Amino acid sequence: MPATDTSKGYVPRITQLDSVFLNSEAYSLIKSQLLTAVKYTGQTFVTKLEPEIDAALQYILLNYTVGHHKSSIGQQLLQIKYKDSVSFRKLKYYIFVLVIGKWLKERHSLIALTVTKNDSVKNVTGRCVDLLEIGFRIIQSFNLLLFLYKGSYPTILERIFGLRHASADPSSSRAISYTYFTRELLWHGFAELLAFVLPLINLQYFHSTMKKFLPSFSEDKKSSGDNLDMKFDLETTCVVCNRLPVLPHTFGCQHVACYYCVHSSYAANPTFSCSLCGHQIDSKIQIVPAYMPKLGS
Ligand SMILES: [Zn+2]
Ligand SMILES: [Zn+2]
């Protein structure tokens, strides 16, 4: 690593980048709380004035963190701050440019519309803003490369204003718990494996096999599969899913199953048998729609 500052107060690159991400995360959390609060009343108002509300919120947030303590929320969480040599005056300018810049980016079309009604001027402004944004992104990418090389100023505005990060407590360095990382990695790997393997396991087969061995609490168990007098009323449940049958079908015994349950069970396991009476389906043609007897007859 070139140009690594080993003096007191050195802040690793990853910590500086993390602080930038934590800042935006913290802001979106606060904003979502606000949106939840006005969910039922002032939503149209908030949507209309979103850039202004954004700017105001960001200004308040930055003013009370960076403006007063020389460290943003993300920086405080990571125990870093801007260098003591940075003046509060400079920070105020930095906050102002940051907030106004974002607001201008959102509102440029409206401003152009207010200033002039001329469409061509509006289009030119729009193009200019687009070009500016592209230029800004290119500079930001160069800045990131430079940051990775030199290890200071993760954002372009911080470089312009000369805001260097420093450790808030030089005696303590950020400890990275590798046990935690390993656990996370293992867990993610395991979850991915499960997501891949679970659809391949024939759960229907396990289900019907288990049901065969487990004792059934139903009285129907004693009745024989040869008895084709189908019992079907409003209390009847599907032998597979135990719920009210959807598109009820019979399959050779007096019991009923959903169309989906019986077909998928038979497709997954050709030795599928009724869990109540043990009747095994011989062929697919045995599976026929069951008809609800007329009520009151
Ligand atoms: Zn079912
Ligand atoms: Zn049966």
Image (cartoon, helix red, strand yellow):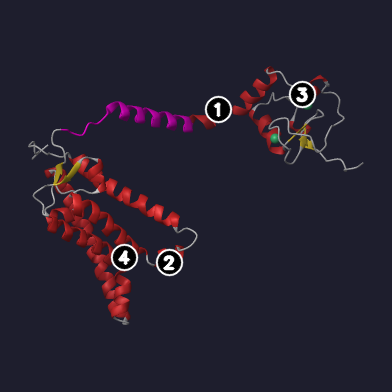
Q: Looking at the rendered structure, which numbered label has been put on residue 45? A: 2
Report, in whole angstroms, how far the alpha carbon at label 2 lies from the one at label 4.
17 Å
Callout 1, which amino acid? Answer: Ile
**Dot 4 beta carbon under 8 Å from ligand 1:** no
Ligand 1 in which quarter: top right
Quadrant (top left/top right/bottom left/bottom right) for the N terminus: top left
Does the CB distance between marks 2 and 4 fall below 8 Å?
no
**Label 2 packing within 10 angstroms: few (<14), some (14-19), many (20+):** few
Regarding residue 167, the answer to whether it shows in the image is yes
Report, in whole angstroms, how far the alpha carbon at label 1 lies from the one at label 4.
51 Å
Q: In x, y percent, where is residue 125?
A: 26, 73
Residue 212 picture quarter: top right
Callout 3, which amino acid? Answer: Ser
Q: Residue furthest right?
A: 297
Magenta segment, principal secondary structure? helix
Magenta residue check for 188: yes
Residue labelled with disc 1 = 201
Callout 2, which amino acid? Answer: Phe
Helix or strand or loop: what does disc 4 sit on? helix
Residue 296 picture quarter: top right
Helix or strand or loop: what does disc 2 sit on? helix
Residue labelled with disc 3 = 218
